[in-house]
Amino acid sequence: MRVCLSCLLLVLAVNVQAQPVPGASATVKHVYNLATPTEDSDTPVGALQRTEFETYGPNGRRLRVEWRAPDGSVSLAFMELYDASDQPFGAVYFEGADLDPTLERFEYRPEEGGRVVRTVTYLNGAGEVTGVNEFVSDADGREVERRYGVSAEGARGMDTVTYDGANETGYVYERTDGSRRIENVFRVETLDERGNWTSRTVVRNGAAWIFETREITYRAP
């Protein structure tokens, strides 16, 4: 089954654009399904959905994200692009065996209170724009809003993200027209010695949705 592009862009926004772990050189996250299978996902309850790998350079910048299916095949490869001052200016990703890349172009603008908006324009291999999202970071660099389907009329929908320190505690997705509201709460089960989560349950609209475990490799001091 091939996921629709608009759905993929939302999944990428939530999972791939998430904040890196400070001081990490690599992370490995296992994602298990806890929800009743649907026509969009037939993964049995408790089964592994995917494994996500992230690698970081010595200066903390994220170099690559890779998702692998339970059979080990690569379902997504994402690489962030940086300028000479280590500011990310774009990204490129490949979905599954599709060799036609999707490109991301980043632009930044300040908002009041020290917030910064990163506009991400998505382009296909022919250079055609396929969508625009916005990601808003607060003065501490935490991503606090994600705006989807941005156009001259506004955004189609938005995530409002909450935190406990550096750990994201959840987010609420709402359609602008009021037709849909999804509340995701991250229930942390275990933390490592640096206070970063190593296992958590994602509760969606009051019901357990997925369970995640994470192994973090930190860079030597």
Image (cartoon, rainbow, N blue to C red):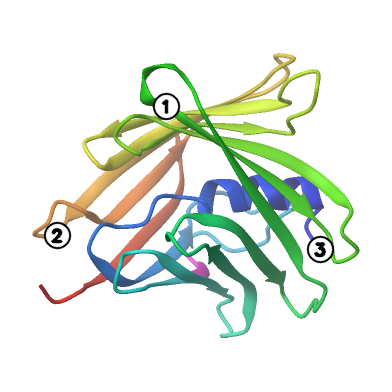
Q: CA distance from mark 2 to mark 1?
A: 29 Å
Q: Check disc 2 and give the amino acid type.
A: Asp
The x and y percentages for residue 77 are 61, 73
The residue beneath circle 3 is: 2
- The tag on residue 115 is 1
Dot 2 lies on which element? Answer: loop
Q: CA distance from mark 2 to mark 3?
A: 36 Å
Question: Which quarter of the image is occupied by the N terminus?
Answer: bottom right
The x and y percentages for residue 87 are 46, 55
Question: Which of the two labelled residues, at mark 2 and mark 3, occupies the earlier sequence position?
Answer: 3
Question: Which of the two labelled residues, at mark 2 and mark 1, occupies the earlier sequence position?
Answer: 1
Residue 21 part of the magenta segment? no
Q: Residue at x 48, y 22 (%)?
A: 111
Q: CA distance from mark 3 to mark 1?
A: 36 Å
Q: Nearer the viewer, mark 2 or mark 1?
A: 1
Q: Nearer the viewer, mark 3 or mark 1?
A: 1
The x and y percentages for residue 180 are 68, 23
The x and y percentages for residue 9 are 69, 49
The residue beneath circle 2 is: 192
In this view of the protein, which residue sits in the foreground, 52 or 90? 90
Mark 3 closeness class: few <14, some 14–19, many ≥20 residues within 10 Å: few
- The tag on residue 168 is none
131 w.r.t. 65: above or below? above
